[in-house]
Amino acid sequence: MVKVGSVLFNAEGRAALDLAANAGFEIFFDIKFHDIPNTVEQSIRSFKGYPIQLLTIHISGGASMLKAALAAADVIDAKCIGVSVLTSMSNEETHAIYQQDTETLVTRMFRLAEHVGLDGVVCSPHELAAANTILTQALKITPGIRNHTNPADDQTRTMSAQEAIALGADYLVIGRPITAAPNIAEAFAEIYTSIHG
């Protein structure tokens, strides 16, 4: 499976999906739909025919939007994955916007995701324990995977690949630790070895 995110999709459009599909890949379509229910539903339906396995939506869009997204995801035969709180957000930022700490906000979003029946969630590895308690049957997808710290990184709630797997992550999203490395092959091999030994 390959991830097509907003940077690639905004630059290349559906050609990016065509390229992945024609190469035989399933697609993790990570553009985080977030709009009124009808717009989200029609937008998702427009991707019917692509081998999209997983697609992401913002849980903060509310129950009506999530239900519309689920209905559309069913039409295109994809799983609907809810994004909780972006891993770039610190506790201070979360409190400034939502007037609550990150843990409380994430827990409320997980409960909403469970209530509407989302297929999974995207969350920081630090929230996996809560996800495993509230969303027992849902997929857990974790970005913010960092085997080494980087003071310039905009991800604030990070963890190593091995730690995230031990806490119950079903999928890891690993981007810049590989793509921004001086030697991509070495970076990939290091992360692969840290997971598989």
Image (cartoon, rainbow, N blue to C red):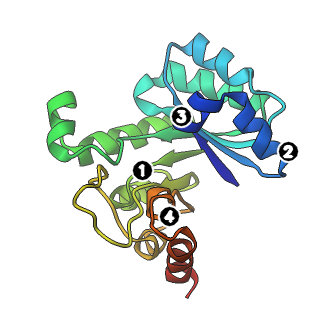
Q: Which residue is mark 3?
A: 6
Amino acid type assigned to the residue bearing label 2 in the image: Asn
Q: Residues within 10 Å of mark 2 (few under 14, many from 20)?
A: few
Q: Furthest residue to the front?
A: 182
**x and y percentages locating residue 149 in the rendered image:** 28, 68
Give SS at disc 2.
Answer: helix
Q: Which is more foreground, mark 1 or mark 3?
A: 3
| CA distance for labels 1 and 3 | 18 Å
Amino acid type assigned to the residue bearing label 1 in the image: Cys
Q: Which is more foreground, mark 3 or mark 4?
A: 4
Residue shown at 80% from the left, 27% from the top: 48
Q: Which residue is mark 1?
A: 123
Q: Which residue is mark 4?
A: 178
Q: Residues within 10 Å of mark 1 (few under 14, many from 20)?
A: many
| CA distance for labels 3 and 2 | 20 Å
| CA distance for labels 3 and 4 | 18 Å
Q: Residues within 10 Å of mark 3 (few under 14, many from 20)?
A: some
Q: Which residue is mark 2?
A: 22
Can residue 142 be seen here? The reply is yes
Mark closest to the chain's N terminus, 4 or 1: 1
Residue shown at 45% from the left, 57% from the top: 176
Mark closest to the chain's N terminus, 2 or 1: 2
**x and y percentages locating residue 5 in the rendered image:** 56, 40
Q: Residues within 10 Å of mark 4 (few under 14, many from 20)?
A: some
Q: Which is more foreground, mark 4 or mark 1?
A: 4
Q: Which mark is residue 144?
A: none
